[in-house]
Image (cartoon, rainbow, N blue to C red):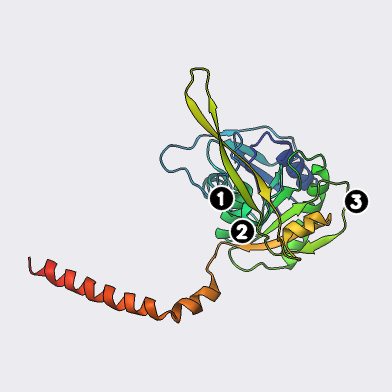
Amino acid sequence: MKILVSNDDGIHARGIRVLARRLAEDPGNEVYVVAPDRERSATGHSLTLNEPLRVGHVPMGENIAGAWATTGTPSDCVKFAVCALLDGMPDLLVSGINAGPNLGGDVLYSGTVSAAMEGALLSIPSIAMSMGERSPKYYEVAAEFASQLSKLMSTFHLPRRTLLNVNVPNLPSDEIAGVAITELGVRLYNDTFEKRLDPRGKAYYWLTGHVVEEGEVEGSDVCALRKKQISITPVTFNMTDRHSLTRLGQWQELDTLSGSWQHLASSNVRAESSQ
C-alpha cells in the first residue's frame, strides 16, 4: 500500500517521524512523507498562491521511500505531493501525529485535519491523527493504532470527500478504555489578545485564552477523550445545515426579499441597456 504522510507540526516533529517509521515497518507499505519545513499549526485549509513553493529532500531512514519538506502549508504539501512529486495516487493519506487534540471546532483551524481533508478532496482515503494532550509522551501508541486502522481502510469505503478524525489519549495502551465512534463536539475557546511591548516600546498582541468544554453532549469526541477512549469521527467538507435549508424555504419574508430583489435587478438591466 502506498501511503502519504503529512502534518502541520513540521517534518522534524517527533509525531510524524514516529508515525512514518511505524507505517513503514508493515510489510507491503511504501511510505512517503511530504510536510512543512516548520510548524504550520492552525493554518486551516490555506494554500500558497502569492509566492513560490520551495521543496527539498529530507533523510528520514532507509525504510521511508521518500521524504520532502516544503515551505508551504499542510494543504500545499498534500496537493504538491499528489500533483508533482509522487508517481501515481497514494492508497492512503495519514496526517499527524499532531501534538495536541483536534476536537470539535478545532477541525476548522487545524492544519492536521486540513491536510487530511485535502487528501479526501482528491479522493484519497484519509486519516487525521492527533494526541489528547499538548505535550504528549505516547506517540508510539497512536502510531500503532494508525497502523492497525490503516489495514482496515480498504475494507470500509468512506463516502466521497470524507475523512476520519482520530484523537488518541496520551496514555499507555493498557490504560486506554477502548475505541468510540463519535460526533464532533463544540469545544470553543475563550479568546483574549494579550498586549505586550517589544524592546523598542511598540505594542504587539498575542492570542491567548482557554478552551471551554462545558455542555458537551454524550457521544462527542470531547466526551470520549475524557473517558480515556480513542475517538474516531467521520468529517466531511460539506458544512451545509440541512435543517436550515428547509426552514429558509419556509421563510415568507425571504420570499418577499427575493421578489423585490429580482424586480430591482430587472430595472437595473433595463436602465443599462438604454444607455
**Placement of 51 over or under 161, stated as above or below:** above
**Placement of 197 over or under 164, stated as above or below:** above
Residue at point 69% right, 36% down?
13
Q: Is residue 28 visible?
A: no
In-image side of 105 versus 63 (left or right): left
- First in residue order: circle 2 vs circle 1: 1
> Gap between marks 2 and 3, in whole Å?
32 Å
Residue at point 73% right, 41% down?
134
Residue lying at the far left of the rendered structure? 275
Question: Few, some or many C-alpha atoms within 10 Å of disc 3 (few <14, some 14-19, many ≥20)?
Answer: few
For the residue marked with disc 1, what is the amino acid? Val
Q: Is residue 78 visible?
A: yes
Quadrant containing the C terminus is bottom left
The residue identified by callout 3 is 175
- First in residue order: circle 2 vs circle 3: 2
Tag 2 near tag 1, CB within 8 Å = yes
For the residue marked with disc 3, what is the amino acid? Glu
Mark 3 or mark 1: which is in front? 3
In-image side of 246 versus 36 (left or right): left
In-image side of 247 versus 252 (left or right): right
State the image coordinates of residue 230 (x, y, percent, origin top left).
80, 56
For the residue marked with disc 2, what is the amino acid? Ile
Residue at point 52% right, 22% down?
198
Quadrant containing the N terminus is bottom right
Tag 2 near tag 3, CB within 8 Å = no
In the picture, the disc for residue 35 is none
Residue lying at the far right of the rendered structure? 174
In the picture, the disc for residue 124 is 2
Q: Is disc 3 placed on a helix, strand or loop?
A: helix
State the image coordinates of residue 68 (x, y, percent, origin top left).
61, 37
The residue identified by callout 1 is 82
